[in-house]
Amino acid sequence: MACNHAFNCPLYQVFGSKPSLQVWTTWYCEGRYQHCARHALGECGQKVPAHLLPNGRSLDVAPEAAHA
Ligand code: SF4
């Protein structure tokens, strides 16, 4: 079962766009999404920072830039 935030998660789109990033999708979005820091905040109704990675670290560039 996949993460129920995938339809509106900007990082899901980014991860799916590059083969080198799809490990994130495989590991979190379509697997252990319960362990994703973004998922946890979303489930609590809290704002999810754009740069927050599933492992709790921050992306070095804006998600839009990573998508380019
Ligand atoms: S698991 Fe995390 S990164 Fe993946 S779609 Fe859900 S909230 Fe987004």
Image (tube, grey):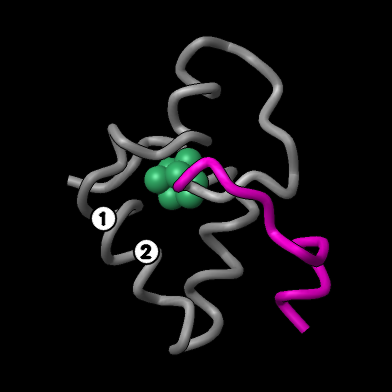
Q: Is residue 34 above or below residue 51?
A: above
State yes or no: residue 4 in magenta: no
Q: Secondary structure at mark 1?
A: loop
Q: Secondary structure at mark 2?
A: helix
Position of residue 33 measured from the top left corner of the image (x, y, whole percent): 31, 41
Residues marked 2 and 1 touching at CB (< 8 Å): yes
Q: Is residue 60 above or below residue 42?
A: below
Label 1 is placed on what type of residue? Glu
The residue that label 1 is drawn on is 30
Q: Is residue 46 above or below residue 28?
A: above
Q: CA distance from mark 2 to mark 1?
A: 6 Å
Residue depicted at x 45% and y 47%: 55
State which tag comes first along the sequence, 2 or 1: 2
Q: Furthest-bottom residue in view?
A: 19
* Magenta: main secondary structure: loop
Residue depicted at x 53% and y 41%: 56
Residue depicted at x 35% and y 73%: 23
Label 2 is placed on what type of residue? Thr
Position of residue 11 measured from the top left corner of the image (x, y, whole percent): 59, 57
Position of residue 52 measured from the top left corner of the image (x, y, whole percent): 64, 44
In the rendered image, the quadrant that contains the N terminus is top left
Residue 25 numbered mark, or none: 2
Which quadrant of the figure has residue 30?
bottom left
Report the magenta residues as a range: 55-68
State yes or no: residue 64 in magenta: yes
The answer to whether residue 6 of the structure is visible from this angle is no
Q: Furthest-front residue in view?
A: 57
The answer to whether residue 40 of the structure is visible from this angle is yes
Within-10-Å neighbours for mark 1: few <14, some 14–19, many 20+: some
In the rendered image, the quadrant that contains the C terminus is bottom right
Q: Furthest-top residue in view?
A: 44
